[in-house]
Image (cartoon, rainbow, N blue to C red):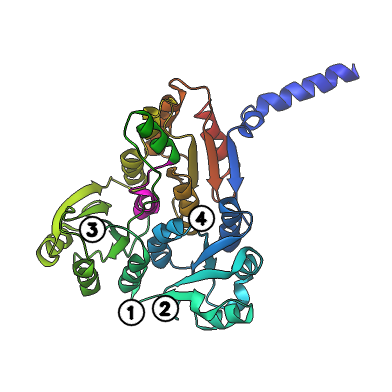
Amino acid sequence: MKKIWLLAALLCFLWSHPLAAMAADKVERVYGMNRFQTAVQVAFKINPGTVENVVLANGWSFADALAGVPLAKQKKAPLLFVDDKVSNSWDALSYIDKHLDRGGTIYLLGGTGVVPENFVDKLLEMGFERNKIHRLAGRDRYETAVAIAWEIQHNGTEYFMASGENYPDALSGSVLAAVLGDITHEQATYQSAQGTLTYPVDGGVPLLLLPSDGSVPQSVVEYLNSVRVPSWLPKQFFNILGGAGVIPQTALDSLSRRVDRFGWIGWQLGGNDRYETMEAINRSGFEGYAGLAGKGYNVPHIYVAYGEDFPDALAGAVLAALNHAPLVLVNESIPGPVRDLLSTYRYENAEGSSISTTLTVIGPPDTISEQTENELNALFD
């Protein structure tokens, strides 16, 4: 009788937790107790050992970190968050102390109002070299994005533009900016096998910020006109993250008049809300390439972050970009556009391949619940 009771209890548990039993094979979660600790846990996923570069941004403001995603990816550096005070930033500083090479480079994003100068003093006290601590800053967020852009290696022909006042449309788009121009080992191998000798390339282009009032800051115009582009390369073109309500047509008209080498607007990726925009961004950037390589699936790894706040998504954006994977946003549930996108990935991943997709959830259960995690997993069963 006791064995029958235990069997019944086990069957009852499995019936009430059908998805949790399967989730471990397909879903992992990366998080800490707060945004600062979550960024550190993401850093461990980027590199659990020693890193050569680290990017620091204020954890309470999105703009500098957003523009910094392509830089962090290109430098293979974790994006860590600090508070306004050194005493409240031990998570990031402890990671740097233990995992950054003593000859490594530290990029501070933003002026002393967001990352105060006593952070430099603390880093010097920890034994890091003064000439390896670089502050990338301007008088405002738009100039800071320009300062970051100068540090990104690219050919000067393509840029992403996002709102400097609202983050949602640009979260997933920061990944796309960071990987633009990448040629992965997989792509290079496939193209070489087809007779075109190709080598892996680490791409990435600047993500510049614009106000929502339709103006274009003079600092942005001066930067675009100062970038030296060989005459044989195309004119500059711009990919817009968000619809006309985010970056008005007047801004695009201003770019065309004031930028000497203005060519055209490339992608203008927008939707009725942040989730439709996210879907458009990811469909533009993360479909098709791996299927050409003969593996029958396009997106073997998908990163998921909370779309109603920015820190976990931006820290995770660097990890996603380094793995050439999309960053998908959810809220307390899974919005319709997200379900449509993931259903497409599931279908494509299943075509000709039995290898399952890995879903990495960035953030704690109080932002993306275990129920939502299970529902995400169920979409791929």
Answer yes or no: do the residues labelled 1 and 2 have beta carbons within 8 Å?
A: yes
Q: Does the magenta stretch include residue 170?
A: yes
Whether residue 369 sits left or right of residue 252 in the image: it is: right
Q: Distance between the residues labelled 4 and 3?
A: 24 Å
Question: Magenta residues?
Answer: 169-184
- The residue drawn where x is 60% and y is 66% is 101
Label 1 vs label 4, nearer the camera: 1
Please tell me how crowded label 2 is: few (under 14), some (14-19), or many (20+) other residues with Cα within 10 Å: some
Residue position marked by numbered label 3 in the rendering: 247
Q: Is residue 273 magenta?
A: no
Label 2 vs label 3, nearer the camera: 2
Question: Nearest the camera: 138 or 34?
Answer: 138
Amino acid, disc 3: Ile
Q: How far apart are marks 4 and 2 (CA)?
A: 22 Å
Residue position marked by numbered label 2 in the rendering: 111
Q: Distance between the residues labelled 3 and 1?
A: 21 Å
